[in-house]
Amino acid sequence: MSIAARLSELGIELPSVVPPVASYVPAIVHGDLVYTSGQLPMVSGALPATGKVGEGDGLVAASDAKNLARQSALNALAAAAAVVGDIERLVGVVKVTGFVASVPEFTGQPGVINGASDVLGDIFGDAGRHARSAVGVPVLPLDSPVEVEVVFSIA
């Protein structure tokens, strides 16, 4: 099944490529790989949530952050598809690196980044199985709760 057909089947509309917020490009091709820059969970040009991930008042709940990681992965997919010119050239996911801006006592970073891994697995099937890092950090650009970068393989 094509990637476009799979997205349609899943009810996922690929977002527009998020413009860079600094001096970089959203994605770059090197050999048979596409490397995306860190993607924030932007929706229509804005972050749907800001702040640290954790439990308690004023913090972003882990379940909400997981959805933000999913959005970040979709933004990475859009950036990769744009740089190669055809989403069908993307044939798999090699590596996902996820950053979670979290309070010091929060240790659920892997669960948050599952939002990115799960949607990529849903889209690519077995070709979506990937190596991964999930890292807790004190702060991310624009006070985003999550940031995700992805390495895709291309045909």
Image (tube, rainbow, N blue to C red):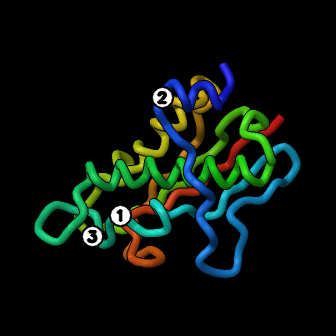
| Pointer 1 with pointer 2, Cβ within 8 A | no
Q: Earlier in the sequence, mark 1 or mark 3?
A: 1
Which picture quadrant has residue 137?
Answer: bottom left
Mark 2 to mark 3: distance in Å?
A: 35 Å
Q: Nearer the viewer, residue 127 or 70?
A: 70
Quadrant in which the N terminus is drawn: top right
Q: Residue at x 82, y 54 (%)?
A: 29
Mark 1 to mark 3: distance in Å?
A: 23 Å
| Pointer 1 with pointer 3, Cβ within 8 A | no
Please tell me how crowded label 1 is: few (under 14), some (14-19), or many (20+) other residues with Cα within 10 Å: few
Q: Earlier in the sequence, mark 2 or mark 3?
A: 2
| Pointer 2 with pointer 3, Cβ within 8 A | no
Q: Which residue is mark 1?
A: 48
Q: Earlier in the sequence, mark 1 or mark 2?
A: 2
Mark identifier at residue 10: 2
Viewed as shown, does residue 26 lie left or right of 155? left
Numbered disc 2: secondary structure: helix
Q: Which residue is mark 3?
A: 104
Q: Amino acid at mark 2?
A: Leu
Q: Amino acid at mark 1?
A: Pro
Q: Nearer the viewer, residue 73 or 82?
A: 82
Task: Check the image and report above or below for 7 versus 103.
Answer: above
Marks 2, 3: nearer the viewer: 2
